[in-house]
Image (cartoon, rainbow, N blue to C red):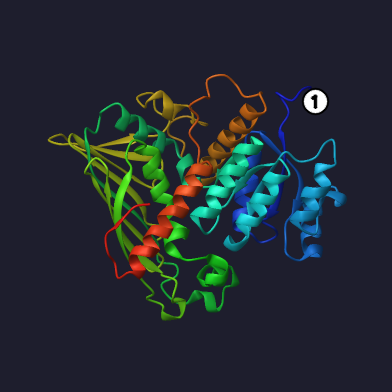
Amino acid sequence: MMTNDRQRPIRWGMVGGGRGSQIGYIHRSAAHRDDVFALAAGAFDIDPERGRAFGLDLGLDEARSYRDYAAMFATEAGRADGIEAVSIATPNNTHFAICKAALEHDLHVICEKPLCFTTAEAEELKAVSKARGRIVGVTYGYAGHQMIEQARAMVRNGDVGEIRIVNLQFAHGFHSAAVEEQNPATRWRVDPKFAGPSYVLGDVGTHPLYIAKVILPHLKIRRLLCTRQSFVKSRAPLEDNAVTLMEYDNGAIATIWSSAVNAGSMHGQKIRIVGSKASIEWWDERPNQLSYEIQGEPARILERGMDYLYPEARIDDRIGGGHPEGLFEAWANLYRRFGFAINRERGLGPAGIEDLVFPDVDAGLEGVRWVENCVRSADAGGVWLDYR
């Protein structure tokens, strides 16, 4: 039996992510992987009875399977064993209100992206989290793959040289037709009332944007140009394809292709960093490998779990080289970092995590800011705009 706060899991709740939710299942699987979190309560569904039944199926006490998030936050706050953190896995338009309410009840928050719809809202959440001393994590789940940390270390240690070109894409083909006509899970994503000011820019484009920030933390966007299209016309004014050009403050350039209409593509998230010495490339369909291409030498493939990787990458190793890891491990790595960060705020974190890298409230804010700037550029006719 756990004997003290340092050893016991963080008491954790969920809003959304109920029966049939793929993302809810991923959250729970990742959170429980390392026993850092223990599910204690939930408000899983907009239908209270359906949500209550699902909570019982998960083994929760019926009294802690709530009709809505407001009831859960209020009741749990009065319990000696109340939840300490909450994950938000609901449609985009609800994130801001739920996140703010959670912070105001002194809960740490792990939120699906986008964190909210506007930079002003994101700044408000940042201010509340700072005032309350609470962590806000954003589930850019792909950033938990081990080889992202390897790429970050390679750039920092000069293996790639001066960064010149950054090519990013997340371009799948699953919505190349109007699938939302038959699929409610997709329908809200193309409705501005629920999805906000963008579809693919916010839904997929912010993922490689954040990974690039992890690998290249020293680069700042100076200006950008975005053009967006609605190839499935019924999705207008939301885009299902967009191309963004960016200039960094060191003179490097970047492109991000965000798309749901790349017919035939399974996932299509790729990150290529081109430097003066070499290039590195990561593809999320082959996440256990990182391509390392030195000019004038044969290309080499670095494999996860191997001793030749930098220590920062090996920290995330779970099962040794040769065994493929996937999305659940990547998400579990993020949840472990969220847990370390929460425990650090509680004065319980292990030593040596002062430089812990995880998608925090600033990462959520930056994703919202980037989408705003892209929409602003695209709606002005695809023009260069100073990044703000």
State which quadrant residue 213 falls in.
top left
Left or right for 340, reference 370: right
Quarter holding the N terminus? top right
**Count of numbered circles in the view:** 1
Give 333 or 158, whichever is nearer the viewer: 158
- The location of residue 6, given as percent across then percent down, is 70, 23
Please name the residue shown 69% across and 47% down the image. 102
Classify mark 1: helix, strand or loop. Answer: loop
Q: Is residue 299 above or below residue 179?
A: above
The answer to whether any part of residue 190 appears in the image is: yes
Point out the residue furthest to the left here.
296
Point out the residue furthest to the top here.
351
- The location of residue 207, given as percent across then percent down, is 43, 51
Please name the residue shown 40% across and 66% down the image. 173
Density class for disc 1 (Cα within 10 Å; few <14, some 14-19, many ≥20) is few
Please name the residue shown 85% across and 47% down the image. 61
Left or right for 266, reference 168: right
Left or right for 43, reference 120: right
- The location of residue 37, given as percent across then percent down, is 68, 37
Q: Is residue 374 above or below residue 31?
A: below
Q: Is residue 134 above or below residue 101?
A: above
State which quadrant residue 47 falls in.
bottom right
Please name the residue shown 71% across and 24% down the image. 7
Give 266 or 358, whichever is nearer the viewer: 358
Left or right for 385, reference 133: left
Three-letter residue code for mark 1: Met
Give 275 or 354, whichever is nearer the viewer: 354
Q: Name the residue tied to disc 1.
A: 1
- The location of residue 260, given as percent across then percent down, is 41, 66
The answer to whether any part of residue 113 appears in the image is: no
Q: Is residue 308 above or below residue 250?
A: above
